[in-house]
Amino acid sequence: MQKIIKYLYLKSPRFSLIGFIVIGVTIVGLLGICEWFALRKSIDHVNELHAEDKARNNHDKVNSLSKPLEQQKHPSAEEKMPQPTKPLRSTNKTKEEVKGKNNVDKTERPDLRKLFDEDFSTHLRTGINRKLGIKSGTTEKFIIISEKEYLDFAGKSKFLGYYIPSSTDTYQIIEYLSDFYKTTLDEFDKKTETQAGHVAESHMTSSRDLVFSGRIYIYHVTFLSLQERAALERLYESKGLSVIFRGNEYLLFIWESKH
């Protein structure tokens, strides 16, 4: 190779220069082409790896989605055969069934009246309904409330409870009960007397010997604001009483605790 280059240079320096340039360009071009093929091959390899990863992920997703289907029982030949059509039930019967279900759901939902009747089930209870007259100007309207006396023979005490249905005069009624509770106690003592005690004890305790604890539970359907409750609590405390309000918040608490 050196002899050829030397011969060309001696023969014609200009021609040899052009030959060197052509040879150099050719070599550089060949090197560039080799680099291009190598780069393209590496890029194609990377793309193939990405494609394989993507295909593997898609395959895993399809497998995860198809698992529940694979676990399903394949119907046998007998199951594939058409079954005789059952006669349709009448529309009226279906409505009755739906109506019955709705009634069951409604009866399961507690309301304040139901809670008033069922609370303190471990105590002996006596109750009455009372008709109250509420004067408003020259007119008078009536509302029926419920009263209960709860007897705690173990603690030798008793306390009261009132249920007030929905009324715009709920606040005034509760004010009125802060004094009227005495009448409630007297009437229960006069109309009913209950004796209780342990079977191993010779002495029985009478309901009239139980001491009123001063506690009064008021179940009210109508909403009372915090200011109204605070004012009523101060009124009852001034008379030596302890009032406990049970409204819709109490109803919601009981409902959520059971579900």
Image (cartoon, rainbow, N blue to C red):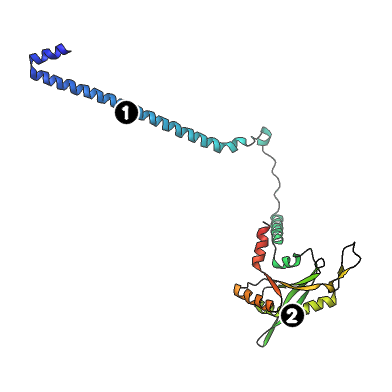
Which residue in the structure is indicated by mark 1? 39
Considering only order in the chain, which callout, 2 or 1, is on the residue closer to the N terminus? Answer: 1
From the viewer's perspective, is residue 145 above or below residue 63? below
Hey, what amino acid is under mark 1? Leu
| Crowd rating for badge 1 (residues with CA inside 10 Å; few <14, some 14–19, many 20+) | few
- Residue at the spot of label 2: 180
In this rendering, position of residue 84 left or right of residue 128: left
Amino acid carrying label 2: it is Phe
- Residue displayed at 65% across by 63% down: 252
Q: Position of residue 94 (x, y in %)?
A: 70, 55
Q: Residue at x 82, y 72 (%)?
A: 210
Q: Is residue 59 above or below residue 89?
A: above
> 236 or 32: nearer the eye?
236
Q: Secondary structure at mark 2?
A: helix
Nearer to the camera, 198 or 160: 198
Q: Residues within 10 Å of mark 2 (few under 14, many from 20)?
A: few
Residue at the limit of the structure toward the bottom, as seen here: 138
Q: Position of residue 196 (x, y in %)?
A: 86, 67
